Image (cartoon, helix red, strand yellow):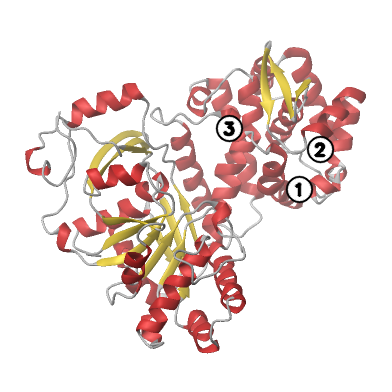
Amino acid sequence: MQSLSTQSLPYIQSGIPLGLPVENWQQLPERVLQFGTGVLLRGLPDYLIDKANRQGIFNGRIVVIKSTDGGDMNAFARQDNLYTLCIRGIQDGQTVEENVVCSAISRVLSAKQQWDDILRVAISPDLQIVISNTTEVGIQLVQDDVRQSPPESFPGKLLAVLYARYQAFNGASDKGLVIVPTELISDNATKLEAILLELAHRNELDGAFIDWLETANTYCNSLVDRIVPGRPDSATQQELTGQLGYEDELLTISEVYRLWAIQGNEQVKNILSFHQADDCIFIRPNIDLFRELKLRLLNGTHTLSCGLAYLGGFNTVRAAMEDEVLSTFISRVMLDELIPGIPYAVDPADAERFGSQVLDRFRNSFIEHRWLGITMQYTAKMQMRNVQTLLHYYQQFGTDQPVTPAYFSLGFAAYLLFMRGTKQQGDTWYGERNGEVYPINDAQAPYFADLWATLTPAELTHTVLANTTLWGHDLSKLPGFADSVSGNLSQLLETGVLATLATQLDTGTIV
């Protein structure tokens, strides 16, 4: 069977609908410099730029920088930088399947071997935009020499690119770039800018450049959201290959849902003109609303459900959503308690719309999202995603006649039960589910193992809730919450997850 490449495109005869590149795609200028080749970038920003090119809106391609050699870099070369994105999922209750040969990437350059080529891209008059996804670890300040070929860190490489551009254009104020990091940390561009400025000072670069760095370039905080598992399993890969009619080493699966929220003004909108191609791209002066909705509803629901679901015998989110009782819990904790508790001014209709989209994503039969992975650093996630929501819920409903958030309480009780370590091997604690051990990948695992070894469930609940080091607040003081969590924990221990859920949801008597 033929492999995907520029030469094979005219001869592809696909058995399923397939979007092919536009005729002039190889002539489009290189307007974007991208740090990273990962599947999230391919499945969201690169896909969206490709979509805009198809509509004749953006008309630009992406030069990709890869910090490590081998792997998918060689596959890009063999396939002339083409790759197939297979989009699968549910939208508004309907199954969606879309297949696209993406052609937005013009070149993939090795930072180690082709740094001079990268610097030549840096001084191109066509270049306007920088995109990155170097993982959360990438946006960190390390001592770096920007005169190396290449500098070691991502900020060091970006600073060297900007310095070369500054020198080539004699510091022209209109030659700055719009820089849009997509790393999953809050205020990613603000933090990146601060690191660049610090590195410029440490490298003793001239003051005029530092001023240009700060004033001529635009740093846009952004939030991306799309599940892109990447290469499918071998059986799915074989099935798709047969349907598509060609082999693709870079074939990538993604869900339907997509979001790219970018903090920027009208000038940013004009440069990032690809935003017109898809209504999932939002360019706003403030993107806090998008961050809050994702953090509180998507991530928060995951965190409050993962313990219950996993201990109940469900390994994936999809499997849990196929169970009527557990899917009811997931829907109710999100829609009835997390939405009212969002600590941010939000239109309830917008929140409910977002919540419905989240539930569609959870039901996606094409995505295998594992609950055990969601439990990693369970305690830190519970604090970051859910504590402020809980406190705000009590501000809304817990004054004269306190209303305990019943589903939140049950989810928190399941968290405590999941954290019951029964054995230790090396530095890892393990819990037990129906005779099967599972790892507790949480920095607080030793703390919980000690508590479970010495305290009753009621004592443990009060001790954990009162731990201000964990939560930043004494949660045991919230009216009725400690008793509710303790009661739920006792029932989970006595009757198990599924029996507890079935009984309480059926009778409406969650403690």
Q: Secondary structure at mark 3?
A: helix
At 48% from the left and 40% from the top, the residue drawn is: 358
Q: Secondary structure at mark 1?
A: helix
Q: Is residue 352 left or right of residue 343?
A: left
The numbered disc on residue 394 is 1
Q: Nearer the viewer, mark 3 or mark 1?
A: 3
Q: Position of residue 266 (x, y in %)?
A: 39, 76
Hey, which residue is sitting farthest left in the picture?
Answer: 11
Say which quarter of the image contains residue 436: top right
Q: Which residue is mark 3?
A: 373
**Amino acid type of disc 1?**
Tyr
At 38% from the left and 39% from the top, the residue drawn is: 255
Q: Which residue is mark 2?
A: 481
**Amino acid type of disc 2?**
Phe
Q: Determine whether 30 is above or below 346 in the image.
A: below
Q: Whole-Å distance between the Cαs marked 2 and 3?
A: 28 Å
Q: Is residue 139 visible?
A: yes
Q: Determine whether 405 is above or below 174 in the image.
A: above
Give the camera-side residue of 130 and 59. Answer: 130
